């Protein structure tokens, strides 16, 4: 049962452009929404995370937008760079990482 | 990644063989996890452990077993490997709860091919 739906599956963005990845969840008990970045041959690494009591969180070029009523959240990468080329996973958790549900991943390619 | 290490990094085995994947961490975390990653399916939790005496099944534990030898070591075993267990396996650690102080850290992964 897929509780976190992620789209698109792949994304190609021009250098300097905005990359947008969307996720939707079903379980209203989720209270923590992290995004992970994974480079080939590496494990996922936490990029940025948000709790549902705020609608937006920004860290450098990365922003999470959160819409609690729609049960959706998205990752925006501003001024996308070739070094941002990686697979991005959204996730949702409730009460600890043993209850984390991951999205299916988005492979981002930023072309010069 | 250096705080969470996995061995081997790559493994090819045959159907029916027993294999063990090992994970060690220097984060000092009590909580450890094993996930498998399949294309198009994201990461799915196999087993998790909150301390040496605590082992719990995750979403997809059938065909797998684990051993928590010490706070820093958590091993995953495939008792009789089958081809649909071909996947990328990740170990992870965390502190209790979630949040900026309790980030989950992943190892570099073990790529397993079952022939």
Image (cartoon, helix red, strand yellow):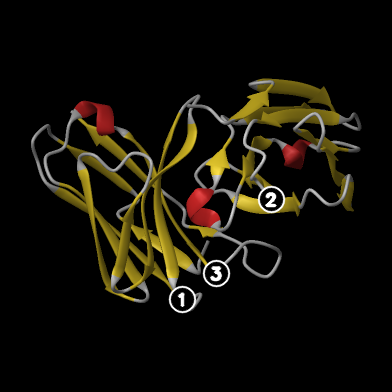
Determine whether B17 is above or below B90 in the image.
above
At x 63%, y 61%, the residue is B98
Asked whether the residues under marks 3 and 2 belong to the same chain, the reply is: no
Asked whether the residues under marks 1 and 2 belong to the same chain, the reply is: no
- Label 2: few (<14), some or many (≥20) within 10 Å? some
Tell me the mark number nearer the camera, choosing from 3 and 1: 3
**Label 1 residue SS:** loop
- Label 3: few (<14), some or many (≥20) within 10 Å? some
**Residue B96 image label:** 3
- In the visual, does A6 lie left or right of A42? right
Earlier residue among tags 3 and 1: 1
Q: Chain of mark 3?
A: B
Work out how far the residue at label 1 is from the one at label 2, CA to CA, in angstroms.
Answer: 28 Å
Work out how far the residue at label 3 is from the one at label 2, CA to CA, in angstroms.
Answer: 15 Å
Choose between A13 and A98: the one closer to the eye. A98
User: Horizontal and vertical percent for residue B34?
Assistant: 38, 52
Tell me the mark number nearer the camera, choosing from 1 and 2: 2
User: Horizontal and vertical percent for residue A94?
Assistant: 60, 51
Work out how far the residue at label 3 is from the one at label 1, CA to CA, in angstroms.
Answer: 16 Å
- In the visual, does A79 lie left or right of B33? right
Choose between B101 and A105: the one closer to the eye. B101
Q: Is residue B78 visible?
A: yes
Judging by the rendered image, the residue that carries numbered circle 1 is: B26
Q: Chain of mark 1?
A: B
At x 89%, y 44%, the residue is A55
Judging by the rendered image, the residue that carries numbered circle 2 is: A31
Q: Chain of mark 2?
A: A
Q: Quarter holding the C terminus of chain A?
A: top right
Determine whether A94 is above or below A16 in the image.
below
């Amino acid at each position: 049962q897929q509780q976190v739906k992620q789209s698109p599956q792949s994304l190609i963005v021009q250098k300097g452009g905005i990359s947008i990845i969307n996720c939707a969840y079903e379980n209203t008990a989720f209270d923590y929404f992290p995004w992970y970045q994974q480079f080939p041959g590496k494990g996922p690494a936490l990029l940025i995370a948000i709790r549902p009591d705020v609608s937006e969180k920004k860290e450098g070029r990365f922003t999470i937008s959160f819409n609690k009523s729609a049960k959706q959240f998205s990752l925006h990468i501003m001024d996308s760079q070739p070094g941002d080329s990686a697979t991005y996973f959204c996730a949702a958790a409730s009460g600890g990482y043993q209850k984390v549900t991951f999205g299916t991943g988005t492979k981002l390619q930023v072309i010069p | 990644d250096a705080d969470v290490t996995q061995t081997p990094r790559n493994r090819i085995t045959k159907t029916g063989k027993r294999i063990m994947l090992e994970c060690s961490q220097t984060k000092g975390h009590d909580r450890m996890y094993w996930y498998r990653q399949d294309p198009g399916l994201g990461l799915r939790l196999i087993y998790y452990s909150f301390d040496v005496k605590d082992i719990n099944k995750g979403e997809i534990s059938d065909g797998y077993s684990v051993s928590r030898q010490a706070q820093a070591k958590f091993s995953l075993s495939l008792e009789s490997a089958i081809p649909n267990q071909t996947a990328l396996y990740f170990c992870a650690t965390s502190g209790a709860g979630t949040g900026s102080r309790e980030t989950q850290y992943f190892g570099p992964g073990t790529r397993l091919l079952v022939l």
